[in-house]
Image: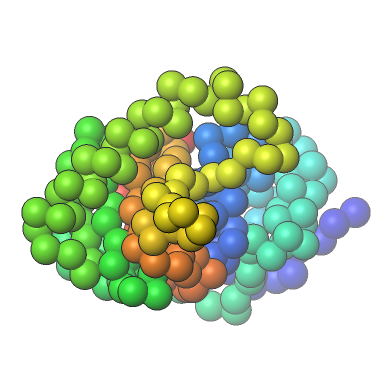
Amino acid sequence: MLEIVPGSYLTVTPYGAWHAIARADENAERRALLSIMHEASSPLLSTTQARTWTACDNDEAALDVLLRLQEKACLEAWPEPRPAPSGTLEETLPALLAGLSDTHQAVLADSMGFCLASAGYDTDTAEALAAVGADILSVAERQSKALSQLGDHLLDGWGNVDAAGISGLSFWPMHIGKTRLALTVSGRPRFNQRAFADLVWTLCVRYGEL
């Protein structure tokens, strides 16, 4: 029987944030991660919360989902709660986006091509990249059935590559609950940073309807 360590406040790691939003699969692990990030501060772990997050009907099954996420380095526990980034999206997102690229350039757009925030680009370039990102998101959604046939070869991002196959610009669909966003990154992505987890957490609090 799995047991909870008392006083464990859960936060989602950068890898866990990626696991939650890279695809739109409906499963208990993804639901749990999105539910945890829907909270404005890291929630206290309990069996009741575990069942709610995972939609499992018994304690053992719910805790087993969380244990798998812990073993995959998707979750970490802290003795005190940690708050989600504070402030408006306009204040918070640009600094977080800058941390996602080795050139400190990135753009976040909604599914209609509206630029929600950018870092390192002038307004016209950011708006152009937002439109391109939204179009790529549309293609990915329209062709989701065909792309699923790729199995283990299915990649999560789209790249603008040169003749050597090196990408200077990449586009990443983000599935924040029922909301679809497009992240455009210049240079090498740095999604293994705390900034990525905080970006996803901020977006889940704002858009994360499950």
Horizontally, residue 155 falls left or right of residue 175, namely right
Is residue 42 among what the camera can see?
Answer: no
Q: Where is residue 121 in the image (x, y as percent from the top left)?
A: 18, 64
Corner quadrant of residue 40: bottom left
Q: Residue at position x 62%, y 28% from top?
A: 148
* Quadrant of the rendered image containing residue 195: bottom left
Q: Which of 198 and 66 is in front in this view?
A: 198
Q: Which residue is rendered at x = 36% and y = 36% of the image?
A: 136
- The residue that appears at 21% across and 69% down in the rendered structure is 120
The residue positioned 43% from the left and 55% from the top of the image is: 162
Nearest the viewer among 96 and 82 is 96
Number of marks in the image? Answer: 0
Q: In this view, does 37 lie to the left or right of 51?
A: left
- Is residue 98 found left or right of 73 in the rendered image? left
Task: Quarter of the image for the N terminus: give it.
Answer: bottom right
Residue situated furthest front in the rendering: 163
The answer to whether 73 appears left or right of 176 in the picture is: right
| Location of residue 200 in the rendering, given as x and y in whole percent from the top left corner | 42, 57
As drawn, the residue found furthest toward the bottom would be 79
Whether residue 176 is visible to the viewer of this picture, yes or no, is yes
Q: Percent position (x, y) of residue 168?
A: 39, 61
The quarter holding residue 75 reads bottom right
